[in-house]
Amino acid sequence: MKPMPVCAMRLDGKTMLITGAGSGIGRALAVACAEQGARLLLVGRRRAKLEEPRALLARPEQAMLLAADVTQAADRRVMRNTIAETFGCLDVLVNNAGVLCVGPLHGADDDELEDLLATNLLAPMALTRDLLNLLRTAERPRIVNVGSVFGDIGHPQFAAYSATKFGLRGFSDAIRRELMAEGIGLTYVAPRATQTEAAHKFDHLVAPYAMAVDSAEVAAAQILSAIRRDARNSYARGPERFFVMLQRLFPGLIDQALGRKLPAV
């Protein structure tokens, strides 16, 4: 078994792939990691959106852009081949791409549910599998799965979204143990509600549930800190950490707290 590193990880010269890099948390994380000297492969569905974070870099040549859909096997093969041909190995894989589904479950159609599962859960599993050999060739490889506090606390109006993040958290625990003997680390990061392009979908829930909403930059800083510390898990600071603990010990209390605040539909 390879010994697991204990010192802080330096990103200078490291190759990182960030999915969902064209907006929100992914965009902010790309800028933050570039400032640490990382070499970036930024992946997103729209090339024009990927140009935005690269334009913010002091050295735009640090970032390679790849318009690709993480849910498509052919596009994942292009990602793998691009890394192999350009960099030779992959130091850090950040599974960040995600979509949001908000509202009563009866209002979600099959297409929306399938896209949610494909993007938030199946794609991180498949991309991790597809890139394992490239991670194995790195000196200190790490997989980072960006989840949500809703992956611990099943939240009304976010039922399907919570299910995908619960699944991602379970996958993270299992694959961490599976890869531990190979020296491949895994970090699961759970930001709280974040101000992204999709945030307007839950604006009407912020007041009833007294939700704290972080900027994308705050969430990105949380992820970057977790990567550099080789953290197992990372939860946003604030009352959400307490609620996660309470959920695990006394879930009935969370039932009462959130169920009573359910807005009329």
Image (cartoon, helix red, strand yellow):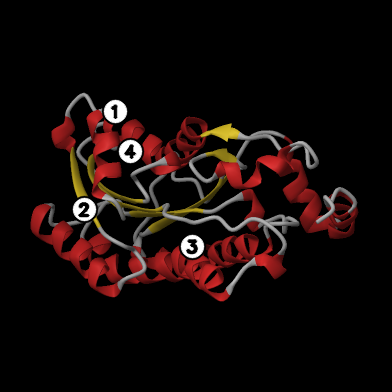
Judge left or right: residue 240 versus residue 27: right
Name the residue nearer the viewer: 60 or 101. 101
* Amino acid type of the residue that numbered disc 3 sits on in the rendered structure: Asn
Q: Would you say residue 8 is visible in this rendering?
A: no
Residue bearing mark 1:
35
Q: Earlier in the sequence, mark 1 or mark 2?
A: 1
Which quadrant of the figure contains the N terminus? bottom left
Residue bearing mark 4:
30
SS assignment at label 2:
strand
SS assignment at label 4:
helix
Q: Earlier in the sequence, mark 2 or mark 4?
A: 4
Residue 82 lies, in percent from the top left, at: 15, 59
Q: CA distance from mark 2 to mark 3?
A: 19 Å
Q: Earlier in the sequence, mark 2 or mark 3?
A: 2
Against 88, residue 199 (above or below) is above
Query: Are the residues flagged by discs 4 and 1 in contact, CB closer than 8 Å?
Result: no
Q: Residue at position x 76%, y 49% from top?
A: 245
Residue bearing mark 3:
120
Residue 48 lies, in percent from the top left, at: 25, 44
SS assignment at label 1:
helix
Q: Would you say residue 259 is visible in this rendering?
A: yes
Q: CA distance from mark 1 to mark 3?
A: 27 Å
* Amino acid type of the residue that numbered disc 4 sits on in the rendered structure: Ala
Q: Residue at position x 76%, y 42% from top?
A: 242
Q: Residue 127 falls in which quadrant of the image?
A: bottom left
Residue 94 lies, in percent from the top left, at: 37, 52
